[in-house]
Image: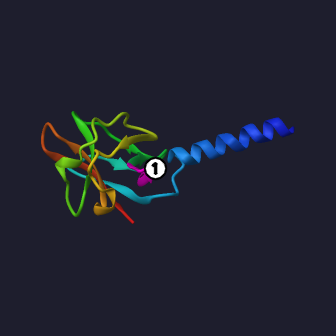
Amino acid sequence: MDRRAFLITSLAGITAASTGIAGGHGRIGTFEGASNHVTTGRAELAKENGKFIVHLLDDFTFDGAPDPKVALGKDGYDKSTLMGLLKKNRGASSYEVPEGINGEDYNEVWIWCERFNVPLGVAKLN
């Protein structure tokens, strides 16, 4: 590998790590399904550039439901933390925690069906 290729590869690794997709710089939890839904994989809550971000990591999977949204909870779902619709049912995606919400106050990431007001999955953060 020449020097240029080495530098490009190294920078790509640094960029991936800084986006949170690779994980490793926030609190991480593993999803458990709820309401007869299959939700697996890991979620990470990290602070980046002064904002809290939820990353669903590469191993995330969800079996599908109407109106799935991402939110936080502290020993239970908190509607004020809704971050919008789940972007995809499989793989990595990221969600910005609403302004004014301190991510350090929460210990869970939820996948929530707002239409039917039921949990679809929860990851308890370490």
Residue 7 left/right relative to 26: right
Q: Quadrant of the N terminus?
A: top right
Callout 1, which amino acid? Glu
93 lies above or below 74: above
Horizontal and vertical percent position of residue 101? 27, 52
Q: Which residue is found at the position 16% from the left and 47% from the top?
A: 118
85 lies above or below 78: above
User: Where does label 1 land, which residue?
Assistant: 48
> In terms of depth relative to the viewer, which is nearer, 56 or 25?
25
Q: Which residue is found at the position 32% from the left and 40% from the top?
A: 63
Per the rendered image, the range of residues in magenta is 41-52
> In terms of depth relative to the viewer, which is nearer, 47 or 76?
47
Horizontal and vertical percent position of residue 112? 22, 45
The single residue placed furthest to the left in the displayed view is: 116
> In terms of depth relative to the viewer, which is nearer, 73 or 59?
73
The single residue placed furthest to the bottom in the displayed view is: 126
Location of residue 116 by image quarter: top left
Q: Quadrant of the C terminus?
A: bottom left
87 lies above or below 112: above
Residue 1 left/right relative to 114: right
Location of residue 124 by image quarter: bottom left
Q: Which residue is found at the position 35% from the left and 43% from the top?
A: 96
SS of the residue under disc 1: strand
Horizontal and vertical percent position of residue 2? 87, 38
Question: What secondary structure do most residues of the magenta stretch adopt?
Answer: strand
Q: Which residue is found at the position 28% from the left and 41% from the top?
A: 83
Residue 20 left/right relative to 12: left
Neighbourhood count class around disc 1 (C-alpha, 10 Å): few under 14, some 14–19, many 20 upward: some
Q: Residue 49 magenta-drawn?
A: yes
Horizontal and vertical percent position of residue 12? 66, 40
